[in-house]
Amino acid sequence: MGITSLRVKNYIFVKDLEIEFHPGLNIITGETGAGKSLIIGSLNLALGERVDWSLLPEKKIEIVLTLEPPEESKKILEELGIESDEELIIRRVLEPAQKKSRSYINSVQVPAGFLKEFTSLLVELHGQHSHQILLDPRTHVDFLDNYGGLMKLRNEVKEIFLKVKTLQDELHALKKEADEAREKEEFLRYKLNELKKAELKKGEEQEIEERVRVLSNFEKLEASIKEVLDELYEGEETVYDKLSRLLHTLEEGEKIDSRLKTEREVIASLLTEIEELWRSLLEYKKGLYYDPVELETLRNRLTFLNQLKAKYRKTIEELVEEINIIKNTLNEIESFDERIEQKEKELKEAEQKLHEKASLLSEKRKKVKKSLEKQITSELHTLGMEKARFEIIINKREIDEKGMDDVEFYISTNPGEPPKPLNKIVSGGELSRVMLAIKTVLSEVDKVPTLVFDEADAGIGGKIAEIVGKKMKKISKRRKLIVINHLPQIAIFWDRHFVVEKIMDKTTIITMREVHGEERVREIARMLAGEKISDSSIKYARELLKIGEGA
C-alpha cells in the first residue's frame, strides 16, 4: 500500500527523475544543498499543494505519483465516476509561463483543492511545518480523537452542530421577517380596508370610460342614429324603398331569365337585413338617454380610480390582485408566532441532541486521554527523554463542531517540574521526538498508508538518533516510510537507501539513485566524516550498518 513511484520532469534542477519506493523504510540522503528539498517539493506539488510560480523556470513541469490505494479511497473515486483498480496515478502538470496548473487522478482532471483533500487519505508528510502544527493547541484534539477512534462520533457532533447553526440562522431570519412584516401590518390593513371599500372590479375602468364617452356625446350620438334610421327606413326615398324597387325589377327579369334568381335572392336578403338593422338601431335609440347626475357620478368614480392608481402606482387590475396578496400576507403575519414557536422547538431539540453527543464525546476523550498519555510518555522515555511526563489537559468550553472540549498537550521534561504547554518549553530536538512519539503511537490506529518525514532528525544526534531510527523502523513495519535524513544513525535502518546528488556542468541537474553494498557503506561513511572519507570512517560505517541490519 501507499506510494510506489515518483516521476519528476523539469522541476527546477530536476530534469527527469524516476524513483520506485518499496515497503518498509525508504531513506533519502545526500550532501547539504544536493537537492533533497526539491524531492519533497515535487512530492508536495503532486499531493495538491499551492504553486509558488516565482520559483519555477518557464518549462512545462510534470509530476506523476503512483500509489496502491486503500479501499476507502477507491470508494471516494467511484462515487465521482473515476475508475480505480489496484493502481492509482496522480499527475500534476504545471505551465509556469501561463501560470496554469492541472491535476489528474487516473487521467480524470480534478481541482487541486480536491486533490489535496483526497491525497491526505494516502500520504502524510511531516516536516518543520508539521512541528509548527504540533505547537498549535487547536490541533491537539485531532491527535486525541484519531488515537481514540472518535472521529466518527466527532463527525456526528459536527453534523448536529451545523444543523443547530442552520436552525439558528433560520430562526433569526424568521424573527426578522416577522418584525419587518409587523411594521408593515398597520399599513397593509389600512390599504386592504381602502381597497375593499373601493369595490374594485377588473374591467371597470374601461366600462366607465366608455359610458362617460356616450353620455358626454349624447346629442351627437342621438343625431347620428336618427340620420341612419331616416336613411334606412323612416324618411322619404329610403334605402329600403330603393332596394324594394330593385327587387321588383329583378323579379320581373327572373320571369324572363331564371338565371337572375341568385341576384334577386341577394337583394331580398339585403332587405331582410335592413329591417333587422333598423329594429336593432331603434332599440338602441330607445335606450339612449342623457343623465347629468350619472355622468357626474361616473366622472367622480374615474377620478377616484386614477387617484388610487397614482397612489399605489398600479393598474386597477393589479390592485384587485393586491387585495388577495395583502390577505395572504396578513394571514402569514398572524402565523408568524406559530412558525417561530415551531422553529424554536426544533432548535431546542437539536441543541439538546448536540449537548448529549458532545457530552458523550467529552467523556470518551477523558477515558482515552489516560491511555494516550501513558503511551506517549513511554515512547518519550525510549527516545532519551527519561524524565519526561506527557499530559493532556481537557477543559470545557462553548460547543463548536469539534465538541465542548479544549484539548492541549502539556509536557514536563525534568523531575518536580510542573507540566507546561508544548510551545512554552519544548526545544527543536525535543519537539521532533514528541512528534515521533505521537506518530509511533498513532501508527497503530492511523489508516494513512505512507508517512513522509522531512528533517525528523533536526536537533538530535548520537544515541538518540539511533533510537529515533529504531522507532522509524518499527513504524515502517506497519506503514511505508519515506525519510529525508542527514544522520547515519538513522540511515542504517534502511530497507531501501537513495542518494540525492547535484551534478554541475554547464547546467545544474539533480539526480537520485538507489545505493547498495559498498556504495552504501561509503555513503554512511560520508555522513559520518564528510567529504574526506577515511579508513576509520569506513570501518565505523560497517559497524553501524551491522546494528541496523540487526534491528
Image (cartoon, rainbow, N blue to C red):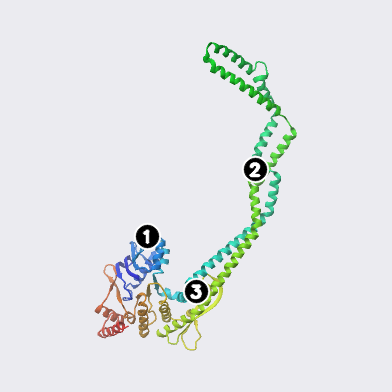
**Label 3: which secondary element:** helix
Q: Nearer the viewer, mark 2 or mark 3?
A: 2
Give the label on residue 108, or none: 1
Residue at 69%, 40% (x, y): give it. Answer: 303
**Residue annotated with mark 3:** 138
At mark 2, the secondary structure is: helix
User: Relative to 199, is 551 on the left or the right?
Assistant: left
Kind of residue at disc 2: Ile
Picture quarter containing residue 21?
bottom left
From the top left corner, tell me how far across and down residue 535 is, in percent.
25, 85
In this rendering, is residue 426 above or below 47? below
Label 1 and label 3: CA atoms lie apart by 35 Å
- Residue 84 location (% of width, % of height): 36, 63
Q: Is residue 378 in view?
A: yes
How far apart are labels 2 and 3 at the CA level? 64 Å
Relative depth, front residue between 407 and 411 = 407
